[in-house]
Amino acid sequence: MLSGMTAQNSRASAATVDLLDAVRKCGGVARSMTLQHDGFSPYVIAQAVAQGLLVRVRRVWVALPGADRELVSAARDGVVLSCITQARRLGLWVLREPEYHVAVSPHGRGGTPDGIVVHWADAVVPRHPDALVDPVENVLALVAACQPHEAAMTIWESALRQGLVERAALMRLPLPRRARRILERAVPFAGSGLETLFSIRLRWLRVRILPQIWILGHRVDFLIGERLVVQIDGGHHVGSQRTSDIAHDAALMAAGYHVIRLSYEQIIDDWPTVQDMIARAVAAGLHLAA
């Protein structure tokens, strides 16, 4: 009798281990019905909850203790993480995220929690019922509809630059009009969101501005006209990288280029001064070959 109970407990323990592994593969939060479809009985799930190995999120979801709080919140509220919130989670260049953004189907039953922006919109790419995060295509479509042009463009170009989505694939989708317009202008060549902002904000300047150009064996952020080089320093411009950049600046100037080096703070917090600086340099002909 005792050996039979031991074998039964061993089987239950193995089933629990498999269950926890299945939830882990779902990102730490899983729908109970899906787990049952995968062969885990309601009893095994309930036992894992009773033992504190899983926690219930509403009646239809379970989560590992310490699971991603944003995913747990999405499951609790019946929404998917999207727009700038999911863009940030994907590692895209989001300048500011003052509010939490989620999405729900127009005919869905998601909640409307306080302090959260809820996008009630049809998905460009259908969402799986178990999804707690939006596909990147849906994220970009909502970003285009929700965010100012500059902010949207930096996120789109970041997605293209990182290879999270291909332009050709986006072109085949039934994108909303605003998303289609951004796609037509977005390029994957800017090295960062700062460079995207710089390029967008100077489009009014009727001179050629080329991003990521190789000059004297190094890549420069922008070449305006033929001789005006603009370098943009991110937050990691320190140590040996800074020393190398200074040496390259000196080589550029010795070769007849004019170099303007800008910081993150200048572009984000003092753009009028930056714009004036570039405009005056162009007016003085510093972008022209001698």
Image (spheres, rainbow, N blue to C red):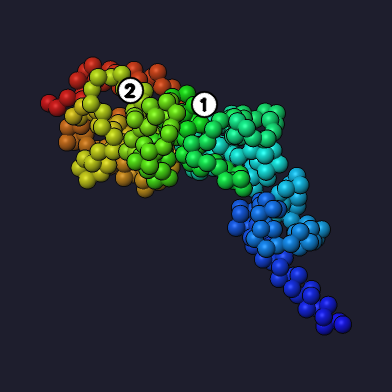
- The correct choice, above or below, for 64 with respect to 135 in the image is below
- The correct choice, above or below, for 269 with respect to 52 in the image is above
Instruction: Give the position of the N terminus as an image quadrant.
Output: bottom right
Would residue 198 appear left or right of 218 to someone viewing this image?
Answer: right
Mark 1 residue type: Cys
Residue for badge 2: 202
Q: Secondary structure at mark 1?
A: helix
Q: Position of residue 125 (x, y in %)?
A: 49, 40
- On the question of residue 190 being in view, the answer is no
Q: Nearer the viewer, residue 119 or 287?
A: 119
- The correct choice, above or below, for 91 with respect to 262 in the image is below
Q: Find residue 276 and report its image quarter.
A: top left
Q: CA distance from mark 2 to mark 1?
A: 23 Å
How packed is label 1: few (under 14 Cα within 10 Å), some, or many (20 or more)?
some
Mark 2 against mark 1, which lies toward the viewer? 1
Q: Nearer the viewer, residue 211 or 183?
A: 183
Would residue 75 appear left or right of 174 to someone viewing this image?
Answer: right
Q: Position of residue 91 (x, y in %)?
A: 49, 43
Which residue is most to the left? 290
Residue for badge 1: 146
Tell me the tag on residue 70: none
Q: Residue at x 45, y 28 (%)?
A: 176
Q: Residue at x 69, y 66 (%)?
A: 17
Q: Residue at x 38, y 27 (%)?
A: 181
Q: Secondary structure at mark 2?
A: loop
Would residue 46 appear left or right of 227 to someone viewing this image?
Answer: right
Q: Are marks 2 and 1 in contact (CB under 8 Å)?
A: no
